């Protein structure tokens, strides 16, 4: 029970406030506590217990502890002064004593406080005022401070007035609060007491809890490092030839990348001038809608060199959505490898590259960008599907790359595996990070990491989404990397502990697109909190604010504002929303003003808290925005879409612990019908993974929905009667793959997507099917077939194999025996001199006769080996042995008597 006695200076301040507000000492201290809770937790109105005279016992229908206590509720309006609020609370105390005889049941029903069953149904904070009579002269009287070991409420504040002394003592539940937290609360209450006495007429919304020591600490922590502030244009001017770009095992050295980007930049300028009749301006847009290829990086670099703002569109966007995004821009250059746009300057990618290759001039194209010019624009999808364009300048990217280079030790010896969607802002960071430091950049061919590619590229660094790592079991693959960067959402607990336990070098990054991708970083350890986000990068401000926008020490979970050079310019063609998201900040501290010439900030809506050694931890949101697979979803928008359906009587949407979107509805429609309707108005990532139908929502004693009583999707299994078990080995293995990803029992007739699957899990499922079953299985087939039974039937029809029943008892494993062959047995048998052609060979022969230059059936490839790993003589010997052992590799087509035949060369030739 921490206890403190007020010094004489604070007693003077207390008496001054009491006179100004015309209230009692108890009312003033209680008002200060209410103001402190409002500033640190945002509660403007909550019940507090106070002690009164003996209540009439015939009205009490409970025991002991409620006889002398009543509930005080007095809403706080931050636009008023503290004196007026203290007078209001004093009047509430007076009214409370007049109505203290109200029956207990009526009080509980009126308060409607949401509490656990083990706590008081009325209040969790109790304030008690004790006035000790001063002994007469000559009498001996000693006040004994007795420690308490039990706490009836979450907090009990004892105010003891003994003569000219006044002390505060707090009892608290040790399972909820640390002693340092309670002591800190007392310190800041005393700070408020002193601050309010200096100006009690100040509106409470203009008060800040920042003490001089807090301000000094923040300024020292955020000291500007302008000399180290990297300019983004340094990347473009660099002449380093280290590193390169690799795609599908084809390496393009950095020198060639820069040469190609110079040529493409010249063509882009020429095309813009010819089409619009004037040179482009720095913030004109170059929109990309292309597939991944070895020309993607030169294309992006060329756009920046030419002075355009690069705006990539995701390949999964439908035509109407792409047109909606393009309609917000003027003087657009649109590059695509498709032909589906009109109304803008559209350049075919292949034609653009052909023109660039035809340029023979070695003249170097100098960059035209300034640090303040836009470099790229990212379209955030949102829940409504209406794209919002966030515009980012080179100044923010330069500062981020400077921090990345220091944090993650990337150089010419490094290799970066780039797998993030090129429409995400992280893509730009990956390629510029590699170019700046002379590292090799490997572009992944798919949307998720491929083990085969990573084995060949042998990367040292990789940026990967947590949603993928949640389902990985290739721990040895990730432990080989020097750095694995994750951001976007919280990892599942199981994956978090497994990866760190296996020694994967995980770095948790955190931030917002509106402040150039990431703002904080932390190397994760086994004992790190799962939601740890670390410390802010150099020159970037991550500042806590209260509900009134005033600076707040990072000691409590609080709203977050971002400041610094990484701040985006705003949202394209949305001035009102930009002003709301990027308001002017009059409370910027000294170091913030050095780095923020326009005194703006970005309000993220995130709630952060500082924990061990100054690191930050993510504590939630102050709204209903959530991250699902790296994309933002507004739960209220999803609920509005559900409510608009005519057959939905009620709905509630929440996010499960494993980051899945769950919808609870009161409806007679099936889950598939509801999802089908939602897909018409919501993007795929905003459609709930599970739709659980209820007859009625469970409610608590206050009549509100009891969220804790809602069923978990994993608890709703297929009934035993409807559960169909696998009929063969293929279905059994498919079932194991699906259940490992979806974390639930599956029937062979259950739909993968109705059972909680999504596009990311579908890609992982296809990857595991191909690797574990040695099958070629396109992703689109999973979207078409959806169930284990249909997938197995499709595979067996395409590749007939013997279907075996699953044995009821495990069979014993027969050990393999080594078979030794004699030299005579090792000799390859001689085939017939010639054979007739197979149907496939006949087709090949026919095509070759029509066109002698036809090489459609040739499959050339190049394999690189490191000399220290592969012995060349043994490799050649192995290839000769394979050729001798396989007749197909020694077969060619000949003509005998005008008829095509296949001839097999002997193994000795």
Image: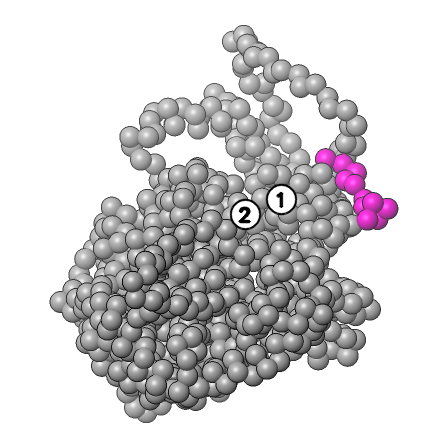
Q: Which quadrant: the N terminus?
A: bottom left
Circle 1 residue:
740
Q: Is residue 503 above or below residue 542?
A: above
Label count reads 2
Q: Is residue 306 left or right of residue 118?
A: left
Report the front residue among 571 and 783: 571
Q: Is residue 437 left or right of residue 134?
A: left
For disc 2, the neighbor class at 10 Å (few under 14, some 14 to 19, many from 20) is some
Q: Extreme front residue here? A: 138
* Residue at x 35% of width, y 90% of height: 276
* Residue at x 49% of width, y 27% of height: 882
Residue 847: x %, y % from top left: 58, 51
- Residue 721 belongs to the span the image colors magenta: yes
For disc 1, the neighbor class at 10 Å (few under 14, some 14 to 19, many from 20) is few
Badge 1 vs badge 2, beta-carbon distance below 8 Å: yes
Report the front residue among 264 and 741: 741
Residue 445: x %, y % from top left: 46, 54
Secondary structure of the residue carrying tag 2 is: loop
Q: Earlier in the sequence, mark 1 or mark 2?
A: 2
| First to last magenta residue range | 719-729
Residue 669: x %, y % from top left: 80, 68
Secondary structure of the residue carrying tag 1 is: helix
Q: CA distance from mark 1 to mark 2?
A: 8 Å
Q: Is residue 431 above or below residue 562?
A: above
Res 681 visible: no
Circle 2 residue:
471
């Amino acid at each position: 029970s921490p206890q403190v006695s007020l010094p004489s200076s604070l007693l003077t301040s207390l008496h001054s406030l009491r006179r100004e507000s015309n209230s009692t000492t108890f009312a003033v201290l209680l008002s200060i506590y209410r103001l402190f809770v409002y500033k640190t937790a945002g509660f403007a109105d909550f019940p507090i217990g106070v002690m009164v005279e003996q209540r009439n016992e015939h009205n009490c229908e409970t025991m002991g502890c409620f006889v002398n206590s009543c509930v005080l509720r007095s809403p706080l309006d931050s636009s008023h002064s503290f004196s007026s609020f203290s007078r209001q609370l004093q009047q509430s105390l007076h009214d409370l004593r007049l109505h203290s005889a109200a029956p207990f049941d009526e009080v509980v029903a009126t308060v409607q406080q949401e509490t656990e069953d083990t706590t008081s149904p009325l209040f969790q904070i109790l304030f008690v005022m004790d006035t000790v009579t001063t002994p007469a002269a000559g009498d001996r009287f000693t006040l004994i401070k007795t420690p308490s070991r039990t706490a009836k409420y979450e907090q009990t504040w004892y105010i003891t007035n003994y003569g000219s002394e006044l002390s505060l003592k707090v009892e608290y539940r040790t399972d909820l609060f640390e002693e340092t937290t309670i002591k800190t609360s007392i310190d800041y209450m005393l700070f408020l007491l002193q601050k309010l006495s200096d100006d009690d007429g100040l509106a409470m919304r203009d008060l800040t809890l920042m003490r001089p020591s807090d301000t000094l600490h923040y300024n020292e922590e955020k000291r500007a490092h302008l000399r180290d502030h990297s300019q983004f244009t340094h990347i473009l001017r660099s002449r380093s030839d280290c590193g390169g770009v690799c795609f599908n095992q084809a390496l393009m050295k950095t020198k060639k990348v820069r040469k190609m980007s110079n040529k493409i930049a010249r063509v882009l300028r020429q095309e813009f001038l010819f089409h619009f009749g004037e040179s482009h301006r720095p913030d004109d847009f170059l929109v990309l809608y292309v597939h991944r290829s070895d020309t993607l990086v030169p294309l992006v670099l060329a756009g920046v060199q030419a002075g355009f703002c690069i705006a990539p569109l995701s390949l999964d966007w439908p035509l109407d959505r792409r047109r909606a995004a393009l309609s917000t821009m003027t003087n657009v250059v649109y590059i695509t490898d498709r032909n589906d746009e009109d109304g803008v300057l559209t350049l075919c990618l292949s034609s653009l590259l052909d023109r660039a290759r035809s340029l023979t001039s070695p003249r170097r194209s100098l960059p035209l960008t300034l640090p303040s010019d836009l470099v790229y624009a990212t379209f955030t999808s949102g829940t409504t599907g209406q794209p919002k364009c966030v515009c980012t300048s080179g100044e923010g990217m330069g500062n981020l790359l400077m921090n990345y280079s220091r944090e993650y030790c990337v150089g010419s010896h490094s290799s970066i595996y780039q797998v993030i969607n090129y429409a995400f802002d992280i893509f730009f960071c990956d390629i510029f990070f590699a170019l700046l430091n002379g590292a090799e950049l490997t572009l992944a061919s798919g949307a998720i990491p491929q083990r085969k590619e990573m084995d060949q590229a042998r990367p040292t660094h990789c940026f990967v989404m947590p949603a993928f790592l949640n389902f990985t079991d290739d721990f040895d693959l990730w432990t080989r990397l020097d750095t694995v960067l994750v951001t976007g959402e919280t990892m599942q607990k199981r994956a978090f502990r497994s990866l760190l336990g296996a020694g994967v070098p995980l770095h948790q990054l955190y931030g917002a697109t509106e402040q150039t991708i990431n703002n904080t970083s932390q190397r994760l350890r086994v004992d790190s909190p799962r939601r740890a986000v670390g410390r802010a990068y150099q020159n970037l401000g991550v500042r806590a604010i209260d509900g009134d926008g005033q600076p707040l020490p990072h000691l409590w979970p609080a709203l977050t504002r971002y400041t610094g050079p990484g701040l985006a310019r705003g949202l394209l063609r949305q001035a009102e929303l930009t002003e709301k998201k990027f308001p002017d900040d009059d409370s910027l501290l000294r170091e913030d003003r050095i780095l923020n010439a326009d005194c703006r900030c970005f309000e993220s809506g995130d709630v952060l808290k500082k924990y061990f050694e100054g690191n930050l931890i993510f504590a939630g949101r102050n709204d209903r925005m959530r991250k699902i697979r790296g994309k933002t979803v507004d739960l209220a928008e999803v609920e509005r879409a559900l409510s608009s359906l005519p057959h939905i009587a009620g709905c509630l949407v929440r996010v499960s612990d494993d980051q899945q979107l769950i919808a609870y509805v009161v409806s007679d429609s099936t889950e598939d019908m509801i999802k089908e309707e939602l897909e018409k108005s919501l993007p795929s990532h905003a459609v709930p993974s599970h739709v659980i139908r209820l007859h009625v929502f469970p409610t608590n004693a206050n009549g509100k929905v009891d969220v804790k009583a809602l069923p978990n999707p994993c608890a709703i299994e297929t009934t035993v009667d409807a559960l169909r078990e696998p009929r063969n080995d293929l279905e059994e293995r498919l079932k194991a793959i699906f259940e490992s990803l979806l974390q639930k029992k599956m029937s062979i007739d259950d739909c993968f997507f109705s059972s909680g699957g999504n596009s990311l899990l579908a890609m992982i499922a296809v990857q595991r099917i191909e690797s574990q079953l040695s099958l070629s299985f396109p992703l689109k087939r999973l979207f078409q077939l959806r169930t284990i039974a249909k997938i197995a039937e499709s595979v067996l029809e395409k590749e007939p194999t013997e279907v075996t029943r699953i044995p009821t008892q495990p069979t014993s494993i027969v050990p393999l025996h080594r078979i030794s062959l004699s030299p005579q047995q090792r000799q390859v048998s001689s085939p017939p001199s010639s054979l007739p052609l197979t149907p496939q060979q006949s087709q090949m022969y026919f095509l070759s006769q029509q066109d002698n230059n036809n090489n459609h059936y040739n499959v050339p490839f190049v394999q690189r080996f490191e000399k220290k790993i592969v012995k060349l003589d043994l490799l050649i010997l192995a290839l000769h042995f394979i050729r001798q052992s396989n007749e197909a590799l020694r077969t060619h087509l000949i003509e005998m008597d005008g008829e095509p035949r296949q001839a097999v060369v002997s193994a000795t030739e």
